[in-house]
Amino acid sequence: MTTGRYSEHDHEHYERPRRRTRPRTKERPTYDDAVDGVVVTVDRGRFTLLVDGHVVSAVKARPLGRKGVVVGDRVRVVGDTSGDTGTLARIVEVSERTTVLRRTADDDDPVERVVVANADQLVVVTALADPEPRPRLIDRALVAAYDAGMAPLLCLTKSDLADPETLLVTYRSLGVPWVVTRRDGDLDPLREALRGRTSVMVGHSGVGKSTLVNALVPGADREIGRVNAVTGRGRHTSTSAYMLALPGGAGWIIDTPGIRSFGLAHVDPVQLIGAFPDLDALTDACPRGCTHGGDEPECGLDEAVAEGRTDPDRVDSFRRLLAARSEPAY
C-alpha cells in the first residue's frame, strides 16, 4: 500500500538522522599549557611574536573569531613555540589592552583602525625641512594620543636645515614635551625620553623615522626612504608596524608606516578637554552641551581668559586641536 508519494518500503520513507544530535557543552578549553607572548608585527594573517625572548610565528585560533590582534597585544599561545623554521603556534587569548591607538582613513570613515595596543607614549616625528612640517597632521596625532590616554612627545628632526623654534612656539603652550635631533647628532635626549616606555613613532614619509630607529636599535635595518624633489613628499618605506626592543632593556619602540592622513572620526571632541585638567576645571559653569570651541556662547574658558585665570595661548592651542577634528584630514 502506498501513502502519498512513497510506500512504506521505499528508503525515502524512513526517518533520517537528526542534525546536531551531538550534545552541546558549555565547557571551553582552559589552555593551561599556554605561554605568554607579545605581538611584534603582523603580515597578512601571520603574527610574529616574542615568547621567552625568541621569535615565534603564529596564527589566530578559530575561537577568537573576528577579534583583531595587533602589534603590541599581549597574547597567550599554544602549540609549537620553539620558533624553529616551519613551526607555527596558535594565539588563543588576547589580554585586556591598557591603551589603544586608533585612526580612521578619513573623517567620514566609520571603520576604526587600531594602529597598536598597550603603548604609553606617542612620538610624533616631524622634519623641520625637507619635507616641510605639517602642523595639521601633528595636531591630529596629538588629538589621537590624548584620546588614547597616551603621553605625547614631539620629535623634531633635521634641525640642521631649519630653526626648531618656528614650530615649537606653536606647541609650547600645550605643554607637549619635545626633543630636537639633527643628522649625526646626539640622540641621548631622545633615548632618555624613550627610557622605560613603550613608544609608538608616527609621522609622514620622509621625516626620518626609520633613520632614528636604525640609530636607536643597531641591526634594525629599517629601510630608509628619500623625499621626492618635485612633490616634497617621502616614499613609504615601512610597510607594517614593527615593535623593537631598545638596547639594554631600556624600553620598546614601534615603528609605523608613514601616514598621509590621520582620520579622527572615532574621537568625541567633547571628551578632548579631559586631557587638560587645568582647562577642564574652568568649564564647570559652561552651558549644557558646550563643546568649548571658540564660537560657543558663555563658554567658561572665555570667562577664565577675561578674568586672567588661565593662559590665553593655552586656550587658543587647545581650541586649535579641537578644530583639527573637523578640518580636512590631509
Image (cartoon, rainbow, N blue to C red):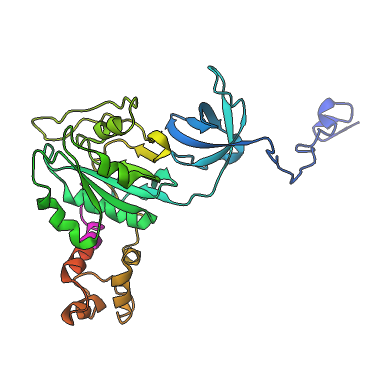
Which quadrant would residue 161 be assigned to in this image? top left
137 in the magenta segment = no
Which quadrant is the N terminus positioned in? Answer: top right
Instruction: Answer whether residue 87 is visible to the viewer in this image.
Output: yes
All told, the count of numbered labels is 0
**Relative to residue 8, is residue 140 depicted above or below?**
below
In the displayed structure image, the side of residue 93 where residue 180 appears, left or right: left
Q: Residue placed farthest to the right in the image? A: 1
Residue 107 is at least partly visible in this image:
no
Which percent across, then down, holds residue 240? Answer: 36, 32
Percent position (x, y) of residue 235?
21, 30
Magenta range: 320-330
Q: Nearer the viewer, residue 147 or 124?
A: 124
Picture coordinates of residue 40 (x, y %)? 44, 34
Compare residues 190 and 102 and report the one nearer the observer: 190
For residue 328: magenta? yes
Question: Residue at (21%, 65%) from the top-left corner?
Answer: 319
Q: Residue at x 19, y 34 (%)?
A: 206
Picture quadrant where residue 214 is located: top left
Rendered location of residue 162, percent (x, y): 8, 43
Left or right side of 217 for 189: left
- Which residue shows up at 13% across the image and 57% down it? 169
